[in-house]
Amino acid sequence: MNPEKRLISRKTEADYIIRSKKIKVIPVILVALPIILFFVSLCFGRYPISPGTVFRILLSHILPLQSSWTGIEESVVLKIRLPRVLLAMLVGSGLSIAGASFQGLFRNPLVSPGILGVSAGAGFGAALGILISGQAIVVQLFALGFGIFAVLGAYMISRVRKGSSLLMLVLAGVIIGAFFSALTSLVKYVADPEEKLPTIVYWLMGSMAGASFKDLFKGAPPILLGIFILLLIRWKINVLSLGEEEAQALGINTQWLRWLIIITSTIVTASAISLCGMVGWVGLIVPHIGRMLVGPNHKNLLPASVSIGAFFLLFIDDIARTATSAEIPLSILTAIIGAPFFAYLLRRTGGRWS
């Protein structure tokens, strides 16, 4: 073997070793980072608590430990920070896997969970609930109900004839989104500017401030069930992304699978929005981060999106509640971070997405 071929062979072998190590290390990192940030978030805040104290407080509900902490520390950890941290991770995971699923379904990396009007519908439902009642349960039910209703409306509009394409569904989603955005503006216009309007505006910008275990018990089941279903069928999204004819040739009922993904992702997105308001960019940029780390294979991408989404939104929420004396709405921070990152991604790929 001549020196040039020997050099190429060694380089190929080195690349293979590096790639193999990367494949082994990345899953460990994706599991470890959210867990580490989970404990850091429980310690971190305007009332700092040591990691040892936080660990003992959590462990005291499993083992009979003698109390060495104050009642204030226990209340801060268990009643304020713990439900908020869990909610942020749950919502981040749900929006991220819904975004990755929609991008695979529509074979378009610019698709987000609100593509079919679910975000606009849920936003209108929440605004209407605040205007009519103001009670948390009413706001959440209205947001969830109108989010699902928006997708059903997009489906009805797209069925102009048998065999309508995904493009028709997307265009119908744009129409529905514009319609519900106008209705939301109407609700803000008629709302009391002293009491109702500030609440509506703040809710629409997204916040975890009102998180509680009661909210988690109501909103977690549909999100967790949706995540579980999408993870189960993630390999089929790979087949679906190849095209209609190829998927059918492999014996997959594309119509049934397509609507299973749409309905599941819609319920996950609407449930997430009903819990904490409208949080943008998470479902758009997190799947791209996942592709940079694990590639475009949805068998790996969807679990990675769950982990990265939980870490990303929890990190954003930590900044939101500690950066200033007044809490910053989540959508402001996700846009400030998400827009430059997406611009960098666009420059790096030159518009060629794989």
Image (cartoon, rainbow, N blue to C red):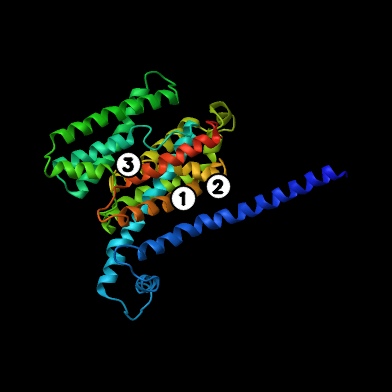
Q: Label 1: few (<14), some or many (≥20) within 10 Å? A: many
Element on which disc 1 rests: helix
Q: Assess whether mark 2 and mark 1 are in contact (beta carbons under 8 angstroms).
A: yes
Residue at the top extreme of this rendering: 161
Quarter of the figure that contains the C terminus:
top right
Report the front residue among 40 and 161.
Answer: 40
Image spot of residue 320 (x, y percent): 32, 52
Q: Amino acid at mark 1?
A: Ile
Residue at the bottom extreme of this rendering: 66
From the image, tell me which residue sits under label 1: 308
Tell me, for residue 174, which label it has, or none.
none
Quarter of the figure that contains the N terminus:
top right
Q: CA distance from mark 2 to mark 3?
A: 28 Å
Q: CA distance from mark 1 to mark 2?
A: 10 Å
From the image, tell me which residue sits under label 2: 293
| 291 in relation to 184, above or below | below
Determine whether, in the image, residue 146 is placed left or right of residue 190.
right
Residue positioned 45% across, 41% down in the render: 341
Residue positioned 18% across, 31% down in the render: 186
Report the front residue among 232 and 24.
Answer: 24
Q: Amino acid at mark 2?
A: Leu
Residue at the front extreme of this rendering: 324
Element on which disc 2 rests: helix
From the image, tell me which residue sits under label 3: 270
> Image quadrant of residue 334?
top left
Which mark is first along the chain, 3 or 2?
3
Determine whether, in the image, residue 2 is placed left or right of residue 31.
right
Q: Label 2: few (<14), some or many (≥20) within 10 Å? A: some
- Is there any visible trace of residue 272 in the rendered image? no
